[in-house]
Amino acid sequence: MSNTELPPGWVAVRLDEISEVRLGRQRSPKNHTGDQMRPYLRAANVGWNGLKLDDVKEMNFTDSEVETYRLLPGDIVLGEASGSPREVGKPGLWSGQIEDCCFQNTLIRVRPAIGVEPRYLLLLLRYEALRGSFAKGARGVGIHHLGAAKLAAWPVLLPPLAEQRRIVEVLEGHLSRLDAAEASIRRSVRRSDHAWASVLNSVARGDLNGRTVHASLRLVSEVADVGGGIQKQQKRRPIKNTFPFLRVANVARGKLDLDEIHQIELFEGELERYRLECGDLLVVEGNGSPDQIGRAAIWRGEIPDAVHQNHLIRVRPNGELLPRYLELIWNSPLVVDQLREVSRSTSGLYTLSTAKVKSVKIPVPSRADQESLVDDADIWETRINAARVVLQGAAARSRLLRNSILDKAFAGALVPQDPEDEPASTLLERIQVERAKGVKRRPTRTPRQRRAAVATAADPCLTPSVITPIPGDAIQQEFEL
């Protein structure tokens, strides 16, 4: 956008024309200890809903290094790199919560010049991060690096200072309401998840919809055939005798994700041995998360002649078990707790085996009662899924509305322009003059310092050193996508 297309009073600038952009100090072994240990922020301390200061590390900073890397109220820190493109450039606003706090080179500090509202710049940089602009401009393979030089040259639209503040006031109001709405949606989604878990438990107990079904506890080995899968090896690189190959990534809890199916080479007799049959239950063998252990989904013959990897265990029910009934009770919290217990290891991983799966006990009612429980559960699932669709639609509309509001805010269409405002071009000239003179931004005083200054002015006999500090400094309220 050229200056002639900008809203009245706005200018297009590079970020480093209106702020100081600096990469943090590298963490090296020699600074792990020392007699000048100081707190510092790293990428893990920056979240989408504000700074996370419950785990702030320390390393040695000399006095001269502190002068370079100290954070001042009003500074913005951004994640310099991430393995996830969405996390690149995620910003947070520093409000002086920790004295003499510095920052590491996993962060880039943006220090706004006098006349640039830090909250405006924070919202603008967050907008760029959320819409993926920083990720597109990042470099690297696997880890996406934004880099201080790239950020310094980032194009920014700057309104007059008074308009910056109007934008912040209106934008924060809109975003806080959207935050509240999205938090309500998330709570409703969690309630739907709890409702479905309750249905699954009722199926396992045999008391869904208020009636009691008698069931006997049976070992899985008594009512199903349990088998392992094929280990992926170099010799199985697909060449000529290839077949569809299901992996752990294809199995979620209660559903399959078949968007990406790999191929594997099979040898004589293996297709007959490993071919999946309609009604097989695919169980995930291991996972670092105890909540995901043993998650399972039924195979309905979606792809002909498919086989599965050795990190999936196949449970093929015999005539006593309905496959859908087995899938429902297997994913119930009652059975998942049992799976978690048998899979626990001393290493912290949770790993199942065919032997462990065979040893699991499950309730087995009559086939007629299984059919009745399945019918009732399917009705509940339809209702719960309908509610989830509504919630997903509401979440999507909220995201669209958020994006629309942000688009308008940073295009000059959210609040009206006031011809009485000092143009941003004048502000930019003043910043350039002050820089030429070597004038740096004065540290923004915290609320505690302002209270001390007021008290000192009211009683000249007092000095800031004898004023009792008042706790509870104001901290910038952040928003979460």
Image (spheres, rainbow, N blue to C red):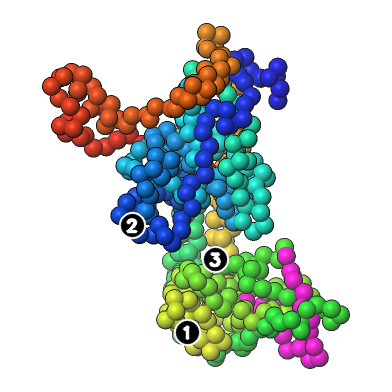
In the image, residue 430 above or below residue 230: above
In the image, residue 472 above or below residue 416: below
Residue at mark 1: 361
SS for tag 1? strand
- Residue 267 is one of the magenta-drawn residues: yes
The quadrant of the rendering that contains the N terminus is top right
Earlier sequence position, callout 1 versus callout 2: 2
**Which residue corresponds to the image point at 19% horizontal and 22% vertical from the top-left?**
456
Earlier sequence position, callout 3 versus callout 2: 2
Q: Which region is colored magenta?
A: 260-282
SS for tag 3? helix
- Residue 310 is one of the magenta-drawn residues: no
**Residue 306 in sight:** no
In the orientation shown, which residue stands out farthest toward the right?
Answer: 240
Earlier sequence position, callout 1 versus callout 3: 1
Residue at mark 3: 377
Residue at mark 2: 34
Neighbours of disc 3 within 10 Å: few (<14), some (14-19), many (20+):
many
| Viewer-side residue, 393 vs 351 | 351
The answer for how far apart the CA atoms under marks 1 and 3 are is 21 Å
In the rendered structure, which amino acid carries the disc numbered 3? Ala
In the rendered structure, which amino acid carries the disc numbered 1? Lys
The answer for how far apart the CA atoms under marks 3 and 2 are is 63 Å
**Residue 210 in sight:** yes
Cβ atoms at labels 3 and 2 below 8 Å apart: no
Give residue 433's position: percent from left, percent from top.
Answer: 52, 19
